Amino acid sequence: MASGIQEITYYEHELNIRRVIEEQASLQNVDAALNICDLSSVERKYNLWVKYLPRITPYYAVKCNDDPMIVKVLAELGAGFDCASKNEVKLVLGLDVAPERIIFANPCRPVSHLEYAQQHRVANGTVDNEFEIYKLHKHYPQSNLIVRFKSEAKEAQCPLGDKFGCDADADATALMLLAKALDLKVTGTSFHVGSGCSELEAYDRAIKKAKNIFKFGELLGYDMNFLDIGGGFPGSDDGKFQKIAEIVNTSVQRHFPDDRVQIIAEPGRFFVAAAYTLVCKIHAKREVRNEAGKLDTIMYYLNDGVYGSFNCILYDHQVVTPEHYLDESAAFPEFKSLIWGPSCDALDKISEDLRLPNLNRGDLIGFPNMGAYTVPIASPFNGFEVPRTLYFRAM
């Protein structure tokens, strides 16, 4: 491997995590965990999206992982961006992304954030209640209102309907009538079936509802030309993604055959989950024995936890999978194991009921698929450092 510009290391064929770790001699001498980021994984995911969802433009959900390197790669590939705050908009605009490639997809925005969007001509934004419509009327009347309705999957990692989205039947029409009375412009509608959606049919159900909202908007004289089908796409299961794509394509062709309608989605974990492997070091160990003195459980204490990268366990309900880096050719007996984070909080538990070899202080443990809802949420709680990141890309 050879180092390239912008602190990116280039590799041939396939990124070998074990080899990367072996080359990082300093890992044994530093306290912080390490993110290994494969930027080419993001590019491969983008190409997969274009292949299976050619009609739908991906607007990357910046909140999922706001690492500027990730955002830069997606910007260069031509993705749009789903931003939830002024700072996310600022990050994206700073990479010379046109404002038309941004949707301000937070239905409840602070006034200062609306004013920033207005100053930078970021016109597309979601809305789901009358108070926000009045706010837009006062602070950004030139914006394009995209009415967000509720249409949740029956099974999702992170349901969102309790917080966002109006009732598609009772409220969406009333909001459009109010916007019409205030001389505001409604251009489309949006939904989100829930982050990490497992009920694939939820997309078709929501797209049908969107079509009805489009019809009502057209009756009011609006030029309805924008549909946002939200997120929920898996980040580490390409087979599942292809099944979702098939359902979405069929539904879109049935209900929105007119190519004049711009259709976007808000994938987050889809692009970044598989791009990151988190490497942690065991800094302490404890053996728990039963009354007879027999070894029951081995506890390991790592240099990252649920207040750092593993916040995804709390926020995103993620189940993490540890991998050790002992000699692959040897067979090691496994023991019941439990993994803790480094803080003094007893809630800082990463994983339990595991089967791992008898590891030692200083050994490394890797966790694949750690790119979603980790980097932007990690904090230095209790004074422990957040992980640094090494970037890699295929030649």
Image (spheres, rainbow, N blue to C red):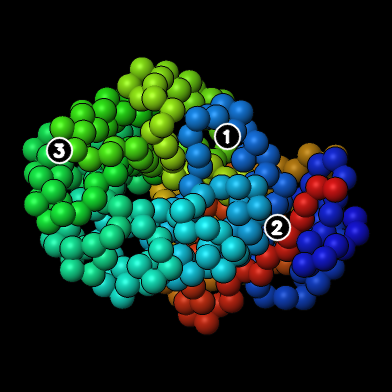
> SS class of the residue under badge 2?
strand
Q: Residues within 10 Å of mark 3 (few under 14, many from 20)?
A: some
- Amino acid type of disc 1? Trp
- Amino acid type of disc 2? Ile
Tell me which label, 2 or 1, sits earlier in the chain: 2
Q: Nearer the viewer, residue 73 or 353?
A: 73
- Amino acid type of disc 3? Leu
Q: Residue 260 location, x and y as percent? A: 41, 31
State left or right for residue 53 relative to residue 171: right
Q: Which mark is residue 220?
A: 3
Q: Give the residue displayed 68% in from the left and 44% down from the top.
A: 43
Task: Please identify, in this view, whether the residue under mark 2 or under mark 1 is nearer the observer.
Answer: 1
State left or right for residue 238 relative to residue 115: right
Tell me which label, 3 or 2, sits earlier in the chain: 2
Task: Please identify, in this view, whether the residue under mark 1 or under mark 3 is nearer the observer.
Answer: 3
Q: Give the residue displayed 66% in from the left and 53% down from the top.
A: 76
Residue, disc 1 = 49
Quarter residue 188 falls in: top left
Q: Residues within 10 Å of mark 1 (few under 14, many from 20)?
A: many
Q: Give the residue displayed 75% in from the left and 43% down from the top.
A: 332
Q: Is residue 314 visible?
A: no
- In space, the residues marked 3 and 2 are separated at their CA atoms by 52 Å
Q: Is residue 8 visible?
A: yes
Q: Residue 273 location, x and y as percent? A: 57, 47
Residue, disc 2 = 36
